[in-house]
Amino acid sequence: MKKIVTLMLVAMLACITLFGCSDKTASTGGNQENEKKGGIVKIKYVVPGTEPKDYKEVFDKINEKLAADGVGVEVEKIYIPSDAWDQKLNLMLSTGEDFDLFHIMQDRTPFSSYYNRGALADISGAIEQYGQNLKKYIPGDIFDGAKIDGKYYAVPSYWVEMASEGEFNIRRDILRQNNLEEPSTPEELISSWETVMKNWKGGKKPYFSNKADFDPVSLHTTVLHRTYDTFPFTVKDKFFYVNQNGDVKSWIETEEFKKDAEFMRQLYTKGLTSPDILVMKGEQLKAQIDSGDWFVNLGTAGSLSSLKKNNPEATVEDVGVVWFNPEKEYLRPLTFKNGNAVPVNSKHPEEAVKFMDWMLASQENYDLVQYGLEGTHYTKDGDKGMKAINDPGNNDKPGYRGSESQNGNVNFMRFDLENSIPENNKVLFEANPEAVNSIAANFAFDPTNVRTEYTNIASEAAASITPIYMGVQDYDKAFPAALDKMKKAGLDIVVAEYQRQFQEYQANQGN
């Protein structure tokens, strides 16, 4: 017995000598291996998009700076084409592929959806220990939107004022060319668009530019909602209408959905929407905006450099922001639009948080991640300005540019003072003191009890509801059969469960 105890003590002493064997090491898996490698942990950060030409050069410098600052983290960014993003990411999560951080688009697939699948790591402890800059530069009410049951499962990107949802961009130079006034109603917008389309002399017609969907937040057809008597309301998780009184309804069964669909039907039948709208890819739509061949964009878009491609006389003042009924309330449907999360299988959740925190530790760090190498990819223009350095070998675009929608922060953002659109900068990147949050902004629906029905209605809606909402099919003719399919797929069951959970959520808000 004494011999056994002696052997155990020797083993414990060896463990302490080599690895520390602390509780912290045991709970954060992978740190023992990390220490063997000199304390530098390599994490993989998965994002949608295309790898920039000078990615390796910039990230070599980022990793040098991380090492010099003693963060103990090295980062590899992995890019997935945007059109393959959902499919590829879901496969990586379901197969337990080895990566440590991934991007979240709340208006596309909210972090709660990943949480409900058991795909997210609880990073509360890591944020508490290593997230001082995150907590300093991300407002508390926005950070709280990344909580479920009091625990953090994501880090919001505080890069945009979410009350910007509900406005659209219009080309004022094109209005002038056609002797048109700025539209103040959806009817006036359609009429102006018809005139512009008729008189258009450009190479490609200025069609409505967006991917097909039935979610108004994703499509930004929310611009129409300000014209309805029932506003303010929002649509949560694609299927659920929620107003500020706390009423929850099936979105597709509302009168507001019908009005949206009728507006989109007019766009389609009048030739303002591409005949191929149901199969348009993101790259095609981005190319349209980048070419400058557009008249109206639901949401914000464009830069002076893109406008000038086919409009040499264009200025930054030629793109304006329009709100229907600007006297009405400004509503944030979500407290944050984008963010980043750690997959549950990550061996390095603390290091993922350390990297996100390091980006906000200094303007120097932020500039390096977002804008690349000073003198190669950009030059500074005053305190908060920057000028991009275009690369002739990269289609006259900078060889590197990060993504502030992925991990930006308004406290550090620089603006291209020559090319960015002033009205867009104001509506996107300045806090709106008159805005209010939707009462459902931080509500996270858990579909566990109705998982089969929820999956079924999502598949059915993509097939049956999207063509109606995009105006390709006539609402009156196609909707009854589509609704019947949705009911059979379990729509009523899912809506009832959503209503139940939301009522419980509201009841707990005062506690």
Image (cartoon, rainbow, N blue to C red):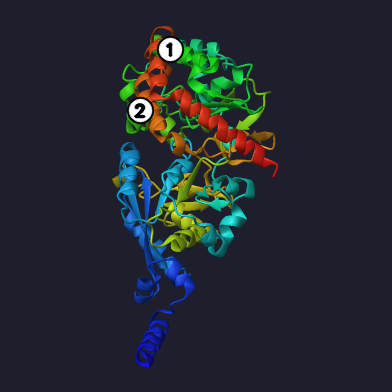
Q: Does residue 17 lie above or below 191 as drawn?
A: below
Q: Secondary structure at mark 2?
A: helix
Compare residues 293 and 309 and report the one nearer the observer: 293
State the image coordinates of residue 339 (x, y, percent, origin top left): 48, 46
Q: Residue at coordinates 45% horizontally, 14% vertically from top-left?
A: 196
Q: Residue at coordinates 58% horizontally, 49% vertically from top-left?
A: 143
Q: Amino acid at mark 2?
A: Ser
**Residue under pointer 2:** 459
State the image coordinates of residue 313 (x, y, percent, origin top left): 46, 28
Q: Residues within 10 Å of mark 2 (few under 14, many from 20)?
A: some
Mark identifier at residue 168 = none
| Mark 2 in CB contact with mark 1 (< 8 angstroms) | no
Q: Secondary structure at mark 1?
A: helix
Query: Upstream in the sequence, badge 2 or badge 1?
Result: 1
Q: Is residue 203 visible?
A: no
Q: Residues within 10 Å of mark 1 (few under 14, many from 20)?
A: many
**Residue under pointer 1:** 265
Q: CA distance from mark 2 to mark 1?
A: 22 Å
State the image coordinates of residue 441 (x, y, percent, origin top left): 58, 37
Q: Is residue 350 left or right of residue 332?
A: left
State the image coordinates of residue 356 (x, y, percent, origin top left): 48, 57
Q: Does residue 408 lie above or below 454 as drawn?
A: below
Compare residues 176 and 443 and report the one nearer the observer: 443
Q: Residue at coordinates 46% horizontally, 49% vertically from top-left?
A: 340
Q: Residue furthest front?
A: 1
Q: Is residue 441 visible?
A: yes
Q: Residue furthest top?
A: 477
Position of the N terminus, as image quadrant, is: bottom left
